[in-house]
Image (tube, grey):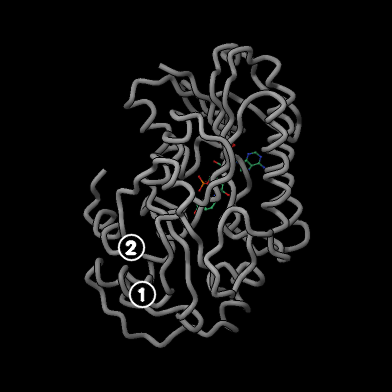
């Protein structure tokens, strides 16, 4: 049995990952600014406050904390919040690590949107960061995570769009489709990397169990937006005939954030496979079939 501390553990990924770890017999504590139940530990990285009870037991930190990228338009103020909520949280966790004598591994979330967009190349972990806002955010986030190497081994998962109907982008996308309004976004030809929530949680656990170090693309694969929207509609037994929503409309309503939906990114998942990880879902069709059937 291992004792885990998950920062941001009350979010979409933290809930599933925490449950999977508990089912395997591990002890799981979650850091939250709003602790709700047993096992939640209060912290507030902005105010540099943390309840130190239980920290002496922690062996592995899983860092998921950060203001939600898709929750609101990226004003200049919001961009600073998105970066600071990640970088400052990790720096504060690092200061707190002196209270964790048993800590022997740190693994952090990061984002797949860090390579820039619209090249035909499948991006590998060794490729350069892009020049857009998300690339800059990921770079700073990963520098902060890698600073944990002074304390223990570090792994970073560059997470693709998480496919889970309980929340995140998919839940939002399924709403209009449920009303029969399924349509491609932008040209529909742009590629979107994705990962099933179950495979993402399994990948975290794989890295932890095998003490993997380094940065890994966390994506089952990528799919064109047209196929993505069509597959969701098909699995939900809903029509898919609405005209594509033009890029300029998405840009008007979502601002710069719309680039996550309208720009194209292909990524390679060879590195994690070469490190012994096997995906459960070989393609988006099988992933969506699982999601819609509501299997656990
Ligand atoms: N879901 C995706 O599709 C996806 C894709 C790529 C990368 N990621 C990354 O993976 C991580 C986990 O994703 P998720 O979908 O589980 O995110 P989520 O549901 O938004 O949860 C993130 C958690 O971070 C905490 N948080 C928010 N603002 C914070 C702040 N200012 N300071 C400290 N903590 C803060 C919140 O915990 P409390 O309110 O309890 O404090 C929240 O529950 C995130 O960093 C996200 O950016 C997710």
Location of residue 255 (image quadrant): bottom right
Q: State left or right for residue 87 relative to residue 113.
A: right
Report the residue at 62% width, 60% height from top: 72
**Residue pointed to by mark 1:** 227
Q: Is residue 104 above or below residue 212?
A: above
**Residue 224 appears at what percent x and percent y?**
42, 74
Q: Residues within 10 Å of mark 2 (few under 14, many from 20)?
A: many
Mark linked to residue 104: none
Report the residue at 63% width, 59% height from top: 127
Q: Is residue 286 above or below residue 277?
A: below
Q: State left or right for residue 71 relative to residue 220.
A: right
Q: Is residue 169 above or below residue 9?
A: below
Q: Is residue 209 above or below residue 162?
A: above
Disc 1 secondary structure class? helix
Report the residue at 61% width, 33% height from top: 154
Figure label count:
2
Q: Earlier in the sequence, mark 2 or mark 1?
A: 1
Q: State left or right for residue 233 relative to residue 52.
A: left
Image quarter where the C terminus lies is top left
Location of residue 170 (image quadrant): bottom left
**Residue 145 appears at what percent x and percent y?**
67, 38
Ligand 1 is located in which of the four quadrants?
top right
Find out whether the residues at labels 2 and 1 contact each other: C-beta distance under 8 Å.
yes
Disc 2 secondary structure class? helix
Image quarter where the N terminus lies is top left
**Residue pointed to by mark 2:** 284
Q: CA distance from mark 2 to mark 1?
A: 9 Å
* Residue lying furthest front: 274
């Amino acid at each position: 049995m291992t004792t885990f501390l998950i920062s941001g553990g009350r979010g979409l990924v933290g809930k599933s990952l925490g449950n999977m770890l508990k089912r395997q017999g591990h002890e799981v504590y979650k850091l939250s600014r709003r602790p709700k139940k047993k096992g939640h530990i209060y912290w507030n990285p902005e105010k540099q406050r943390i309840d130190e009870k239980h920290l002496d037991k922690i062996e592995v930190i899983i860092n998921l904390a950060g203001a939600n990228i898709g929750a609101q338009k990226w004003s200049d103020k919001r961009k600073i919040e998105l970066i600071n909520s990640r970088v400052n949280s990790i720096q504060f966790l690092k200061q707190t690590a002196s209270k964790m004598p048993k800590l022997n591994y740190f693994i952090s979330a990061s984002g797949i949107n860090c390579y820039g967009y619209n090249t035909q190349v499948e991006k590998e972990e060794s490729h350069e960061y892009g020049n857009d806002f998300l690339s800059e955010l990921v770079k700073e986030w990963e520098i902060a995570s890698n600073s944990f190497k002074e304390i223990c081994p570090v792994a970073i998962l560059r997470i693709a769009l998480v496919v889970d109907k309980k929340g995140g982008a998919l839940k939002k996308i399924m709403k209009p489709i449920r009303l029969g309004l399924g349509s491609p976004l932008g040209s529909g030809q742009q590629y979107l990397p994705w990962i099933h929530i179950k495979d993402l949680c399994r990948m975290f656990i794989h890295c932890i169990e095998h003490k993997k170090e380094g940065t890994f693309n966390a994506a089952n694969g990528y799919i064109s937006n047209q196929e993505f929207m069509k597959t969701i509609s098909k699995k939900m037994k809903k029509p898919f005939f609405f005209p594509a929503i033009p890029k300029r409309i998405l840009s008007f309503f979502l601002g710069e954030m719309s680039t996550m939906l309208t720009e194209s990114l292909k990524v390679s998942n060879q590195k994690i496979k070469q490190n012994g990880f096997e995906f459960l879902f070989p393609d988006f069709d099988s992933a969506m079939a699982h999601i819609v059937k509501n299997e656990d």
